[in-house]
Image (cartoon, rainbow, N blue to C red):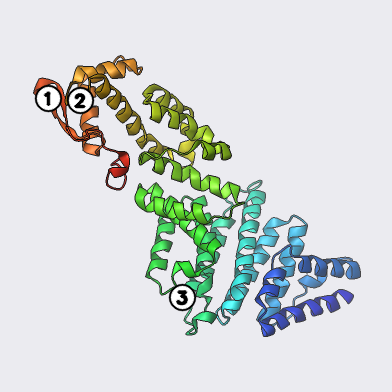
Amino acid sequence: MAGSTRLVKALYKFKMLKTTKNPEELAQIVPIASVYTVKVLDDIWKEDGNWDVLLEEKKRSLWDEMAILHFRASAAYRQSQFITAYRHQLDMYNAFLREFQNMSRWAVYALFAISKDLYDLARRADTQQSMVDSQANKVEEATRAINQGFSACMTDREPLLSKSRKWGTYHMANILFGLYLQFKAYNLCNSMIRAIKASELPSLDRFPMSDQVTFRFHRGTLAFRSEKYSIAKEDLLFALEHCHRDAYKNKTRILMHLTPIMMMEGKMPHSRLLRRYPRVRSIYGPLVKAVKSGDLQTFDKQLRAVEQQLVSLGLYMATEYVRKLVIRQLLYKVFLIEGRASRVPFSKFQAGFAVAGFPQMEIAEVECILADMIFSGYVKGYLAHDHGLAVLSKQMPFPRISTLHNNPSP
């Protein structure tokens, strides 16, 4: 069969790549829609009128089996048979992993490409399967398989570091981050970070910058979610500063997390930055104005308006903490109106809240707010409850936010 001749040539090419260990060429032909793969399938179709030669059951070597499964997956993909394509891709992935255990660094780029295709096909297969079966779980299955690829990189025992598969660890970790976060499996993300930290890997700064930026972004957002804002800030700033200058969407994602952290420290985003990133401006722009003016009513109104967006992105709690800055500004205005007096009656602050749009606030609630602001470090002083007074420090009763230890306490 003519198609068999074309397939034999394709299998020979795969074998030659294994022999020559050409990482660039292998990584270019193993993607499911690569130019080479499409050309091979087109040639077989032209000569045979079908792709049945791919389905012939013959005893083959592991490398041949992997190549055949690759073409089967691609053929099914071209026909939008995503469930079938996924099954072939998963079998191909597992076959490649068996071979990968005996390969060195040159093969990691092929692993990256195969892993990404496996995830993409799993997602498409779940969508296709969910039309007839609600138990679609191909993405979870693919995630477990990709985790094996990650482990095969991280635990490599190759004594010569330049040839070690360990150089694929962070790239595979970044693929897994995307999958784990899709399931909201934050515990698995943190477990992976701990495993990497405990392994004998080269330092992160020796890996490609793209791997560094993506890994530190994910690590930063996880720290953000755990309210470890100082740690999150360090990673997110690195990601922002080293992100590719044209990666607009990625920078927007970073800024969505970084902005409330900086605001908590009293560092408002510049108007130029807000103009450049409309999504950041739409959420944080009105909040920034409210913080600067101490307009608590406007802040609360905007926070309610964007609440669903912030909750869906995991940003609500951090943004709500910024509210204390608005309260601090309001208290500071009352302090100025009272002639910078070190003793200010609770009733004066109550009047300030009334002007700000909270006329029903009781003295007891004002006292609680003052106590919290003093505890958090936004105000220096103490409360004289029996006298109904806030006794403010004579030395900077409203310290600069930037001088507080790390972040103000939530």
CB contact under 8 Å: marks 3 and 1: no
Residue at (60% x, 79% y) in the render: 99
2 and 1 marks in contact (CB < 8 Å): yes
Residue 83: image x %, image y %?
67, 57
Residue 254 falls left or right of residue 66: left
Q: Secondary structure at mark 2?
A: helix
Query: From the viewer's perspective, is 337 left or right of 106?
Result: left
Q: Earlier in the sequence, mark 2 or mark 1?
A: 2
Q: If the image is split into quadrants, where does the N terminus sit?
A: bottom right
Residue at 27% from the left image edge and 43% from the top image edge: 404
Q: Is residue 103 above or below residue 322?
A: below
| Residue behind mark 3 | 155
Residue type, mark 1 in image: His
Type of amino acid under label 2: Glu
The numbered mark at residue 367 is 2
The correct choice, above or below, for 223 with respect to 33 in the image is: above
Residue type, numbered disc 3? Thr
**Quadrant location of residue 301?**
top left
Residue 310 makes an appearance in the image = yes
The extreme left residue here reads 386
Q: CA distance from mark 3 to mark 1?
A: 62 Å
| 3 or 1: mark nearer the eye | 1
Label 3's element?
Answer: loop
Q: Residue 59's spot in the image, x, y percent? A: 71, 82
Q: CA distance from mark 2 to mark 1?
A: 8 Å
Vertically, is 107 above or below 338? below
**Circle 1 residue:** 385
Q: Quadrant of residue 354?
A: top left
Q: Quadrant of residue 267?
A: top left
